[in-house]
Amino acid sequence: MNALLKVSDLNKSFKALHVLKNVNMEVENGERHVIIGPNGAGKTTLFNCIYGTLTPTSGMVYFKDKPIHDEESYKRVKKGMSRTFQKNNLFEDLTVEENVHLAILGNKDYKFNPLKPLLQYKDVNEKKVEVLEEWGMYARRKWLVNQLSYGEQRLLEIILALSSNPTLVLLDEPTSGMSPSETSQFTNFIKKIPRDITLLIIEHDMEVVFSIADKITVLHHGEALLSGDPESVRGEQMIQEIYFGGGALSK
Ligand SMILES: Nc1ncnc2c1ncn2[C@@H]1O[C@H](COP(=O)(O)OP(=O)(O)OP(=O)(O)O)[C@@H](O)[C@H]1O
């Protein structure tokens, strides 16, 4: 079977700024694939082109063997993609379960009716309970989001991304701003996600990278310098010099 996601000769420019330069990358089914690279390398721009937030200047993105690079994000979500963003995207004054409810509702075909009480969406309610139970948030379902710790809020964002039954989830710097204990909670959480869900993650914390990655792609000045298993990437002399020697990956 072919790769779940294939990025082929992808370019993205913002006027004269050539951010992505002929990027080629493949993500296999079930993989935990981590993208590393210094600030400004083009990692989020690459995510935006994969998810449809941005249209590439040229090149192709294939998902499940079909070209998707000119489709809107909502169509990509329907095909099984979901994502989180660098900054929290939660409704902080709503409860945990209301956030989950709205995320599930947002992926349904029927239009949200503001006059219909949330609890009357029976299938959404069932799915909500399933999601809250599966990911360990049921006990805190009535908590307001702003009562959760920062680490729990970031986990809730991932839970929302998982609530659409995705096959591919893109996580953009999920541990940014987390304390060491929140980061290790995150790593444990990632390890519990079943392998029928593929993960593509932008991550700066090298301890996290090497504890979760099956494959690492190094993006440098908009070019995919190399892709490989963690040990081969760690062993590359060029990577040692650029990243581990100079500490260029730490924020
Ligand atoms: N919408 C935009 N318009 C103009 N320039 C942009 C836009 N989005 C990103 N850029 C520029 O593209 C370059 C790459 O940015 P991008 O956010 O993709 O990098 P990154 O590798 O994700 O960095 P970081 O690790 O800091 O998040 C930067 O120089 C940024 O200023």
Image (cartoon, rainbow, N blue to C red):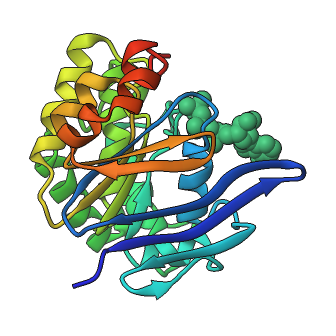
Left or right of residue 152: residue 85: right
Residue lying at 21% horizontally and 48% vertically, measured from the top left: 229
Residue at the spot 39% in from the left edge and 86% down from the top edge: 65
- When the figure is inspected, residue 148 is found, relative to residue 81, above or below; the finding is above
Quadrant of the frame with the N terminus: bottom left
Question: Which residue does the image show at 60% across and 38% down from the upper left?
Answer: 41
| Residue 91 pos. (x, y %) | 51, 38
Farthest front residue?
237
Left or right: residue 18 versus residue 45 is: right
* Residue toward you, 122 or 27: 27
Please give the name of the residue rendered at 38% of the width and 63% of the height, measured from the top-left corner: 104
- Give the image location of residue 40, x and y in percent: 64, 33
Query: On the rendered structure, is 217 left or right of 13?
Result: left
Of residues 136 and 236, the one drawn nearer to the viewer in this rendering = 236
Q: Is residue 137 visible?
A: no
Residue 182 vertical position relative to residue 70 in the rendered view, above or below:
above
Residue 215: tell me if it is visible.
yes
Q: Is residue 68 above or below residue 150?
A: below
Residue 223 location in percent, x, y? 57, 49
Quadrant in which ligand 1 is drawn:
top right
Relative height, residue 160 to residue 240 (above, below): below
